[in-house]
Image (tube, rainbow, N blue to C red):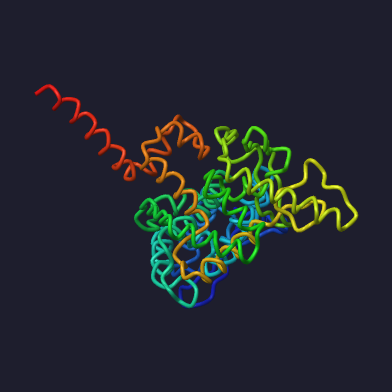
Amino acid sequence: MRGHLRERGQGAWELRAYAGRDVLTGRKRYSTRTVRVKGRREAEKALAAFVTELQTSGMVAGGTFGELVERWIETALPGWSPANEVTVRNTVSYYLGSLLPLKLSRLRTADLDAFYAALRERGGRGGRPLAVSTVRRVHSVVRAALEQGVRWGWLRENPAARASPGPGQPAEVRPPAPEAVLALLERAEQDDPAFAVFLVLAAVTGARRGELLALRWTDIDLELGTLTITRAISEGPEGPVEHQRPKTRGSVRRLALDDATVAVLAAQRSRSVEVASVCGLALPSDAFLFSHQPDGSVPWKPGFVSLKFRRLRHSVGLDEVRLHDLRHFVATTLLGAGVDLQTVAGRLGHAGGGRTTLAVYSHFQQAADRNAADLLGKLLSSRT
């Protein structure tokens, strides 16, 4: 029997049993339990049951949730993108502090439900409520780590599998009005022409932030008036990381540009060439469109763009507008104008022939549907 007994008096016995090795340090671990029984024989039966419990539980006794999380991250990290690593580590750092010291053997679904409820009530900055969407992202990290614990045999079942982070609701799409977009562009042109170009492209192409940051001058054809998206930039632990393909296969696309946008890009290229020349450099053909370096060798950081946009929107009193809302602006404007779903999906880089576009923006197709109804109605009424 891999265990020991110690009588502590008045019918109390301390059970001590081997519980495997620590997954991080390799040291032997032991678990103890105090029971009240009559006599040594009953204590030995209790010890045998205790040993069996530890052997069949599949858990590293005494291991904490924090130890599991760190081991999970270490194991999963090679398959993650840099942005995913940042997201997971930030989630652990910002929200999981109170869970990390808990023993895996004592972590229950009820504990997670109480934890998620507390996050929804006061888990935000300054004790403010935390959005359900954020709580659900926290839950996805917790569940994934615990699921790995089940696969490793540390747990018999995943306590997060039946936990309730909160009702899942699709994020409400709130495209900015054209007047708001124009106000942002006008202020950006006054403050920083290069950033104004970035916003023009966002409002014309509907491209994602990372896709725009990855643009090089070799992706722009000013004569044909086209822009090709083949890469994306994400924020990694050590800074910007360039991916040789954007979010999905459908995200690789060539987009047509109007004459005004082509003129804006031509002016941006002239400024970039001039800056490089002043520094005694020739602008490389594959320089990034948006770079703080004279030779365009390093792209803007995603975090820099987001911060700059927040300051810009605040300066014009549009704090409710997000940078990503410019993508919604493109989609809803085109759908409202009657542009077919597949064309809009292609411009946004949605795969699946428009299924994603339809799921997100179905509500905003009402204007186009109304136009279709009016057209059919006129055709049919013309028979009388």
Q: Residue 151 appears at what percent x and percent y?
A: 55, 43
Q: Is residue 62 among the parts visible in the rendering?
A: no
Q: Residue 92 appears at what percent x and percent y?
A: 58, 62
For the point 52% across and 57% down, which residue is it? Answer: 323
Residue furthest out toward the top: 383
The image quarter containing residue 253 is top right
| Residue placed most toward the observer, 262 or 314 | 262
Q: Is residue 348 among the parts visible in the rendering?
A: yes
For the point 65% across and 59% down, which residue is it? Answer: 193
Q: Is residue 43 above or below residue 225?
A: below
Residue furthest out toward the left: 384
Q: Residue 165 appears at what percent x and percent y?
A: 40, 58
For the point 62% across and 45% down, which residue is it? Answer: 211
Left or right of 2: which side holds 130? left
Left or right of 313: which side holds 302? right
Q: Is residue 131 above or below residue 222?
A: below
| Residue placed most toward the observer, 158 or 351 | 351
Left or right of 359: which side holds 235? right
Q: Residue 58 appears at what percent x and percent y?
A: 55, 49
Q: Is residue 205 above or below residue 15?
A: above
